[in-house]
Each structure stands twice: as structure tokens, then as C-alpha cells.
Amino acid sequence: MFVLPLAILMGVSLPAEPTATVPSALPVCEKGTRYLELTADSPGEAHVVCIHPGLSTNFFFDAKLAHVELARREWFRVIADETGLALVPTVALGDGERVPLKVSFQDGAAPAGVTFTLVVHPSEAERQVEVTRKPRTLASYREGEHQARAEARQCQEEKVHLEAECAGRMGLLGLLAQELLGEDGIAGNNITKSVTSRLGNTLRSMKALSYRSDTERLEGGRKVVRLVVKQLVRNTGNTPWTPARAVLVGPQGVEWKALGVWAQEPIAPGEKRLVGVEVEMTEIEARGTFTLKLWSQDAGTAEFFDGVTFP
């Protein structure tokens, strides 16, 4: 994630270190393969699994399945065989939406089945869940250890890459070093009049600017551009509000996950602060009017800002 251009466009230095109501805090989505071990005396709890529209979540079991009971079956594309199934939400479910899934086994051994609660996450999905009713084998533990080491190594490589990329690259030289200064430079628009805060928002947009910077990258033969939305927002709620993540929703409903979300500091009730969001897409995709969706660190209801356009 590149945070340098966003901070520069916000005009400050880097710090030192859906309309639907979400019924409860969203779960933390596990990365990689999730291993779930069941025992005969396990309580019949529903295991929470993150899902996201358009992303597949795969379940694998160590026994043949007798029956799969999925609520709202028409919301999903389901592919199932004797010992597994894949689920892909195919409709635009609301963030925090919960769907029960119950699986029973053929062999009659205890436990006879397992229950899940599929929770719609705004940006992520758990891609693979492996369910066993007996202790994992040594090979399975070793596979999990190897995967954890690989993920840790990847994080370290990304950290080194980011440190090397940001080292000594401040101001306009930082943009130059990251090849974000195109022939036309950085274009900006004042979009205050077009951006509106939806009814029910905690944050109110007081002023909004958008920026576009060319890059040297191509994607499918199309030029890729870097986009930033900068807003001065007021917190009309009763608790501090700290931006955590964001997506930009295009005219056709396509979502682009933000490369970075920046704020001066937590926004106290009644206070105004600058918030910035950075996204990357092709030059053609950047045309039209977008909706910005922002979530706070407590993963509550999204804040919607309509009418976002770019130079």
C-alpha cells in the first residue's frame, strides 16, 4: 500500500506511527486456510465465517455429507460434492447480513453435523475452511506451519519493499520516485457541491476535492491512474470516529478497495477533520460518478458519500 502520495496531497506529513444496519460488530476474517476441529462433546455453537459477494468460500470435510441446509439458497451459487462445497454470494447482500448454514454427516459419528453463520463482510471473505472430527495429522500441522511461515515471509518482503520505496522520498520527489508524476502532472477538482452525505450518516461532508495522477503502468493495455478523494467531514455522532477502510463504488456497482485511508486524527463528536482515500484503476474506469463508502475502526455501519467525480 502506497501512503506517501495520499499524505502529500492532503498537505500534511505522515503520522509517526452499507445503508443497512449491522446487527453486531463484524468478525475478523482469517487469512489463508482456517482449520476447525470438532469433538464429540463440542457445544453446538454456530461457527462464524466471513463471506463477500462475488468471492468463493470453500468448505472441506473429512467425512461424506448427508445433507446441506443453506438459508436463502437463491442468494448463492453452490457447488457441492461428497465431502465439500463452495459458496459464492451472487446478490448484493448488506454488510453484516447473517445466513445460517447447517451440514450433517452420513456416518452417524458424533458430532452428527456442524452449524455455521455466514456473515457478509464489506471487503473480505474466508477462502478455505477445513473441518475435521478427529485430531489433525502431523502432516496437516506441518502444512499449517509452512503456510504461516510463507505468510510471515511475504509480510516481511512487503515491509522491506515499502521501506525501500519510502526511504528519502518526501515531497514531490516522492511522487517522482514512484512514477506518479505524469506528463500532465496532478489534476484536481473541487467537488464540494456535487458530493452529498446520505441520510443516516454520522459524518457530514463539508468540503471535498478530488485528484488524479497518471502512472507509468498499463493494465490490459490501458493506462492506470491513481485517484484521491480529500474531504473535510464533521462528526455528528456522540463518539469519536476513526476511518479504517474504504471502497469506491462505480456507476455499474463495481467496487475498488482503497489502497489507503488517511485521517489527521480520530474525529471527536462535533469536530471537523480531513479524511483522504486513495484508489487505483484504469483511466477508462475512472470516468463517471462514484459513491465513497467509509468504515470506522469499530466496523460499524458504512458512511456513504455520493457524487464523487475525478478530473
Image: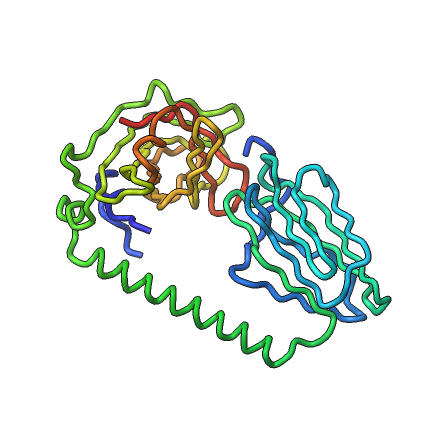
* Residue nearest the observer in this picture, 229 or 56: 56
From the top left corner, tell me how far across and down residue 248 is, in percent: 42, 35
* Residue nearest the observer in this picture, 151 or 94: 151
From the top left corner, tell me how far across and down residue 86 is, in percent: 64, 52
Image point (52%, 45%), residue name: 299
In the rendered image, the quadrant that contains the C terminus is top left
Q: Determine whether 308 is above or below 45 in the image.
A: above
Image point (50%, 45%), residue name: 123
Answer left or right for 198 relative to 87. left
Answer left or right for 241 relative to 95. left
Q: Residue furthest right?
A: 108
Query: Which color scheme did the rendering employ for the protein?
Result: rainbow
Image point (29%, 30%), residue name: 210
Numbered disc total? 0
Q: Does residue 225 appear in the picture of this structure?
A: no
Q: Residue furthest top?
A: 193
Answer left or right for 206 relative to 151. left
Answer left or right for 117 relative to 206. right
From the top left corner, tell me how far across and down residue 58 is, in percent: 62, 55
Q: Determine whether 50 is above or below 192 in the image.
A: below
Image point (30%, 27%), residue name: 310
Can you tell which quarter of the image residue 114 is in? Answer: bottom right
